[in-house]
Each structure stands twice: as C-alpha cells, then as structure tokens.
Image (cartoon, coloured by chain):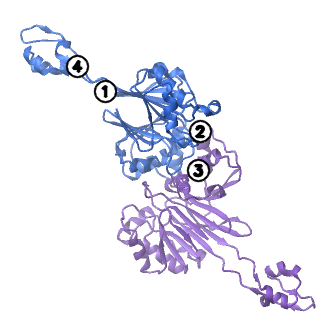
Chain colours: A blue, B purple
Amino acid sequence: MKLTILGCHSATPTAKAHPTAQVLEMKGHLFLIDCGEGTQMQLRKYRVKFSRIRHIFISHLHGDHFFGLPGLISTFLLLGREAELHIYGPKGIKQAILLLLKLGKAYTNYPLYFHELEETTPQLIFEDDKVSVETIPLDHRVYTNGFLFKEKPDDRKLDVEKARKLNIDLSYYNKIKQGFDVENREGKLISNKEITFDPPPSKSYAYCSDTAYYPQIVPQIEGATVLYHESTFLEEHHHLCDKTKHSTAKEAGVIARKAKVETLILGHYSGRYGDLELFRKEAQEVFENVELAEDGRVFEF
Amino acid sequence: MKLTILGCHSATPTAKAHPTAQVLEMKGHLFLIDCGEGTQMQLRKYRVKFSRIRHIFISHLHGDHFFGLPGLISTFLLLGREAELHIYGPKGIKQAILLLLKLGKAYTNYPLYFHELEETTPQLIFEDDKVSVETIPLDHRVYTNGFLFKEKPDDRKLDVEKARKLNIDLSYYNKIKQGFDVENREGKLISNKEITFDPPPSKSYAYCSDTAYYPQIVPQIEGATVLYHESTFLEEHHHLCDKTKHSTAKEAGVIARKAKVETLILGHYSGRYGDLELFRKEAQEVFENVELAEDGRVFEF
C-alpha cells in the first residue's frame, strides 16, 4: 500500500502549498483521492503514471478539493485516453463537470461515469475481488464523505513441503489456498490449517478530510492500518473549528486513539502556521504514531 | 506598460509549462488576461499583488484558458476581498462560475460582475479616462476574442520656463496641459504648441490567442506597440492548424508584419517542441523584432 501526497494544504494555495489531492496504490489500483487545483501538474511533477487512474474519489465540493478535476478530465481527453474513468463525489458534480466540458466543446472520447453520492450513512461504492471502498460520512459545512479503502484477504499460503509429505495431489493446491480441507491420496482428510500459513494481514486506509471532530466515525474506521485525518488548526485556534467545521491536531489524535489505528497522518493545514512539527507534537499528546503529510511525500505501508 | 507571463503553454500543462495567463500593468490598472489552471499559484510565485486585479479578460472557454478562474475567485473570497471584480468572457462563463461557487456554498462577499461577450465584431468593453479595452474577434474552434488594450494620450507637457517668460498666469496651467490656447496677462493669445511638448506616445497591447491565421484582425491592431500572438506550431506541422484552428510562428510573424507592430511576442507553444528558439527563428523569417514568452518572464515597454 503506497500513498503519495500531491497536496495537503487548506483553502488558499500557493506555489509551495498545494490543495488536497493524493494517490493511493492498493492491490494494483491507482486511486486518486480529491483533486484540488493543480493536481494534474503535481501528478506529472511526482511522476505518477496517471493514465492508470480509473477511479477518482471526491470528498466534497469545496474548490480546494475538486477544482483540479475539470483540467485532469480534459487532459485525459487530449492524451487520447480510451480507458473508463469513474468519478465518485457529491450530487452536483456531474452537472458541473459536464457544463465545463460542454462550454469548451470538449466531449470525452473515453467512457466517463459519475457515481453521485447523497447518503448520510456509510455506503459500499466500489468493490472487486481485491479491494472495497466505502464512504465515511463526515461533519463539514457542505455534504462531505471520507473514504475507507480495504484490501480483501489474500489466499492462504500453502506449505508445499508439508503438502508433499502428506501425499496430497497437486490438483488440490488451489482449493487449499482458498481455505478448503482436502483428502490426500490415501483418502485421509487433512485440515487446511495443517498445510497453510495465514496470508499477510489485509491493510486499510481511512481518509477523513474535511471534518469537524466527529467520533461517530470511530466504529467504522476501527483498527485501520492508516488514518489520514485533517488537522486544519492547532488547539490555540480551537474556537475557529465550530464555524469552519474543521478539526485540531489534537482532535485528530483522539480519533486515532479511539479507533486504535496503527498510524495517523495529519494534513489540511491552515496557512497560518509556519512549523508543521507543532501539529505532530500536539497530536502526540494523545496518540504516539503520528506522521505529517507534505506535498510530494510518499508513504509505504 | 509591464507584461508578466504567468503561463504560455498550450493544452496539457506540466509543473514547468503552465497554461495561459498573463498580467498587464497599464496606467495603474492590473489586468489579468486568461486564467488557466494554477494561475493563482503563479500569481503568488511571481509576487504579483493580485488583490489589485479588478478586471479579468477570458478569451475563450477552453480549460487551459479559464480553469484557474473558479479557484482565484474563491481565494479572493477567503482573503476577505471587498473590491469589485469584473469578468469579461464568452457567454456561459457566468453560469459555470456561479454553479461551481454554489456547489461549494461559496457566495462572494465582494461585488462580482460578469460581462458576457457574444458579438463577432470588435466591441469596446472597458473604458476610463486612462485606458480602453476592445475585443478582437478571432478564428478558433470555439467563440474566442483577443483583447486590445490602449492607453489614452497623456496630458501635454507644459514648458514651465517658457510659460513664465510669456507672463501666463499659473491658474491657466491645467488648461494648457489639456491642449487649450490661453491669453497671457497682457491679453495676448498664446498658441498651445508654443508652450507645450508632445506627451510620450500612447502604448497599446494586442493579445491574440487562440486563433488560426486570421488577417482580418490587421486593421484593428495596426501599429500596436506589442502584439502577443499565439504560435502553437511550427511550419513543419502546418497541416495541424486547419483542424485545431491554431497558427504557426511564421503566420504570427506575417500578422505582425502586416500590422506594422513594434514588437511581436510569441506563445501558446505545443508541448511537442523542445527548443523554443525555433519559434523565434521561424517568425524572424518575416518579422524582425520577435520575443518569446516564457513562464515568469516580465516585459517592460
């Protein structure tokens, strides 16, 4: 599981502080999560093979999370894309994108599907045999979802040596990996556990931005490998959270602790702070394993 | 007259090749011309005092010329702008921008005026006592205007020494600068020409992008101080111009020569060329004074 931060700053971007966008590589998928202005330039800068992106997840319709989407869609068109592209985002996103394309007489030459979201309880919005993606309804000024990306368990690992020793026919090996008990050549039933190892644990990534402190999400994200949680402010500006519906670094830490995640990544920093380490320190008052998102930073888990 | 190129590349942007946007400083105005994705970051990078921008001119509704506009408008809102902002662009621009703002529940706290264009003959779209701005209808795949920015002549310069010698009362000095003949203290009529110098010549800037070779514009832009003319291609790819409705560097040179402008600036380069000097060389086959636009380059005239 590999996470590339393309931008992790809030609201008004500068040449060195890009608005929210990130790429999650999971089981062969390249998922784009949010798409602030300039995302297509950031994708090129950090050499992401962005033609491989087939699914784009937009948390909410504030500009710093989706104003890069029309440009990216147009660029795919100009580069001759043929593969399907799926956009998941709040109701209204389809009308906006199609209007912009229509004004430029830029109709896509590839299949473009919109999956508009309007539910306020978690929904399964994408699934194949390797991963699933659910919405995490959040508490922000406009309708907003986080997203929970989960790997499905791998097949069990076969203990080949033991299987040979127990005289099991090769034709059963696939069934064994799928978890079945099988008979050996002598007709004796061999328990699956005896001839397999557990697969590596499945990983999960919970993306929660933008949101006020919202402990209702805890049961859904419990035990996640990685939680990205916004921390627009530090506690000294906690009074700004109510009006703006954002969180502090400490609140992000509390969510991480309650949900017993393995790693917390902070991001969506307000531009008023010079030193990002202050965010880490504050969150570490309540949760130890804290990382800081930075434009261009790559995390591997 | 000062021109700052924020971006001058066509179609698909990269981190080092920004889409079209430029700032023209003329007689105290800061005019933004086109607003491709990332313009607000470029404005910050090149330290343009962009709160001073009151007028934005959009040539056409292809993404590489206006997908940075919603973000810039939102940023003005977040920065607490109070001054009026005027947007001049093709019909449809208002609906698109207002829809995007509405989706993010981001209504502007400053007066935002749209001046939608749909005429196919030159129109005077802005005028005050110092400058005027006209549309230059162009020939592109969608409805497109260039813009002609013209300084109005300054007041005549008073020859103070001579006015004193001729015994002219101080109270007449303003009238003299405005071009009037006046009487001296002895009641003798003094011709204006005798006591004034010509003001510096008025400058003009013709912005023509995007367009096919379109000599119909020549009479309107004749004698311009500076012509910015797109040159998406070199002559070796001339066959691409018909379909895309773009020009070659040589065609830009021909327009400059026919219109007898002082300086030609080339831009809107296709990404297929490595060496921009090839554009200059080609245009110089027909017109001598050629400059190359580059992201971040500042021209003073």
Viewer-side label of 3, 4: 3
SS at mark 2? helix
SS at mark 1? loop
Callout 4: residue from which chain?
A
Task: For marks 2 and 3, give the CA distance.
Answer: 16 Å
Callout 1: residue from which chain?
A
**Residues at marks 2 and 1 on the same chain:** no
At which x and y percent is residue B23?
58, 62
Residue B72 numbered tag: 3
Pointers 2 and 1 in contact (C-beta within 8 Å): no
Residue B103 numbered tag: 2
SS at mark 3? helix
| Amino acid under disc 4 | Gln
Residue tagged 4:
A178
Residue B137 sits above or below residue B215 on the image: above
Residue tagged 1:
A129
| Amino acid under disc 1 | Asp
Q: Answer whether residue A118 is visible to the viewer in this image.
A: no
